[in-house]
Image (cartoon, rainbow, N blue to C red):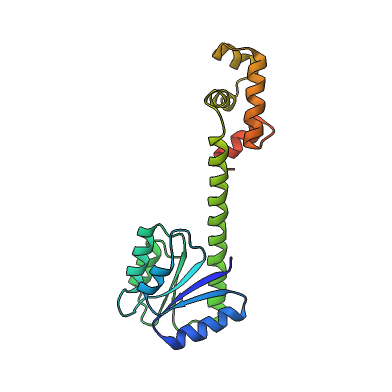
Amino acid sequence: MKTVYLVDDDIAVRDSLGLLLLSHGYTVHAFEGGEEFLAAIDAGSEGVVLLDVRMPGLSGPEVFRQMYELGSELIVLFLSGHGDIPMAVQAIQQGAFDFLEKPCSEKKLLERVNDALEVAIGRHSVRGNQQLLEKRLASITPREREVMDWILQGKLNKQIADEMQIAIRTVEVHRANVFAKMGVRSALDLSQLLLGH
């Protein structure tokens, strides 16, 4: 996933940055304005956005706000030829990855795009892991969930059997099912998985 969305009303900037990124193995989608860009993405779009601050129509910060409202997880790097410190600080406080002034050195731009992509890949991985965990948890029956809760409290099979007033063998079966469905081998593995370690 080396996707970069380039949003800049200056065709010369789009061409030069687009060619630079393409030559370094990135997939580039270029847009003349914020409206066109927003129409092309959805909440599931992945990658990095190089977003010009000042454009006709929607400004970069307005596009950024609409991306947030859309639930977009794209990583935003603002580009500005008219950058000022308050605007940069506000962009970062609102969740932008960085704020680069044009002209920016090719080396610095590529470094920041690469850093932002690493964050994007990390987010994608976390989201995928979370979805897998939710799917596994959904496969557990209410009775298995009850046993799992006791396991997470560090209770032994005999203690769980006494608490639930069921046979130890039944607890063992539920415990085995929980471990199999969650893809773990021990209570410690289960605990770490659910705590996100």
**Nearer-the-camera pick, 49 or 177:** 177
- Estimate the x, y position of residue 99 in percent, counting from the top left: 43, 72
Number of numbered discs overlaid on the protein picture: 0
**Nearer-the-camera pick, 36 or 125:** 36
Q: In this view, does 70 lie above or below 171?
A: below
- Estimate the x, y position of residue 159 in percent, counting from the top left: 60, 15
Question: Which quarter of the rendering shows the C terminus?
Answer: top right
Instruction: Determine the image quadrant of residue 163.
Output: top right
Q: Residue at x 34, y 78 (%)?
A: 54
**Nearer-the-camera pick, 42 or 66:** 42
Is residue 105 in sight in this rendering?
no
Q: Is residue 122 above or below residue 152?
A: below
Question: Which quarter of the rendering shows the N terminus?
Answer: bottom right
Q: Which residue is drawn at 55% across and 41% down?
A: 135
Q: Residue at x 64, y 17 (%)?
A: 170
Is residue 140 in sight in this rendering?
yes
Instruction: Determine the image quadrant of residue 7.
Output: bottom left
Question: In the current view of this chain or complex, which residue is farthest to the right?
Answer: 185
- Estimate the x, y position of residue 70 in percent, counting from the top left: 38, 59
Instruction: Determine the image quadrant of residue 179.
Output: top right
Q: Residue at x 53, y 61 (%)?
A: 120
In this image, 180 relative to 6: left or right?
right
- Estimate the x, y position of residue 73 in percent, counting from the top left: 46, 59
In this image, 37 relative to 58: left or right?
right
Question: In the current view of this chain or complex, which residue is farthest to the bottom?
Answer: 12
